[in-house]
Amino acid sequence: MKVWTVANQKGGVGKTTTAVTLGGTCASRGENTLLVDLDPHGSLTAYFGYDPETIQSSSYDLFQSESVTEASVRSLLRETGVDHLHVLPASVALATLDRQLGTKSGMGLAVSNAVKTIADDFDYVLLDCPPMMGVLMVNALAACDHLIIPVQTEFLAIKGMERMLHTLQMIERAKKLHIPFTILPTMFDRRTRASIDSLQLLNDKFGENLWESLIPIDTRFREASANGKPLSHYQPSSRGAQAYRELLEYLLEGAHESEHRMTL
């Protein structure tokens, strides 16, 4: 089982779109895939027709018990209407976790421990994070094999990504671990100078960790969202769907993957 975290400390850069489309692409290959929504805003949850304000069982429950079991985690999973693709939804109650948990020990591994209980059920798990540092992002980083950082190809988004990299470095130093990561350029519009210049800046500053391709602007992403389906299933021939297929192939090369352990 591979666990990939999608995170950035700036909103609106394509995190949920990346989690859904990449997860859908995995599922389209017949791979059992789980999307885990760790964002109190619940965009991924709402994508598949569930309401994060009223849902009864959610990822919030992972933090309410000192021990989780395969059965308890399975009971939280929901159908997406797509073969081989399930979602563990979010609820707005996630927003209270940092205040509730405080410095309580062991809470940084709640998601990791839960994911391990269902390792035999899924080939891929993708974790969608809130755009802020806190217990939810720490959990997502602790659980993952690889971090994907979507960044819109515009200058303000690059500044937000730099904050994310600073956070990653702090966690790596504090916990003595290495988390491999890929910077994913999103919403690229080759018609604009801003997109072209931003992509060049990303390449100049972060080329070693920058995916060599990009995710283009594609109106089909919006259409797929309105229909509650990943673009990989709504319009598999679209430019956006093709780009995520290429991203999956890159991630599966595995040269940049490494195991790590975190003690929290």
Image: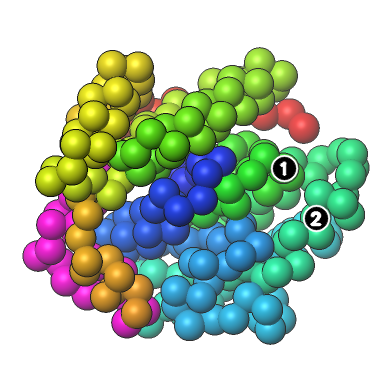
Residue 6 appears in the figure: yes
Seen in the image, is 117 located left or right of residue 219?
A: right
Q: Secondary structure at mark 2?
A: helix
Rendering coords of residue 61 (x, y %): 75, 66
Q: Which residue is mark 1?
A: 134
Q: Which residue is mark 2?
A: 97
Kind of residue at disc 1: Gly
> Magenta span covers which residues?
227-250
Q: Is residue 64 left or right of residue 38?
A: right
Q: Is residue 243 magenta?
A: yes
Which corner quadrant of the image does residue 18 belong to?
bottom left
Say whether residue 191 is left or right of residue 25: left
Task: Name the dominant secondary structure of the magenta segment.
Answer: helix
Residue 214 occupies quadrant: top left
Residue 245 seen in this snapshot: no
Q: Is residue 56 magenta?
A: no
Residue at left offset 61%, top offset 58%: 39
Estimate how packed mark 1 is, as few (under 14), some (14 to 19) or many (20 or more) residues with alpha carbons within 10 Å.
few
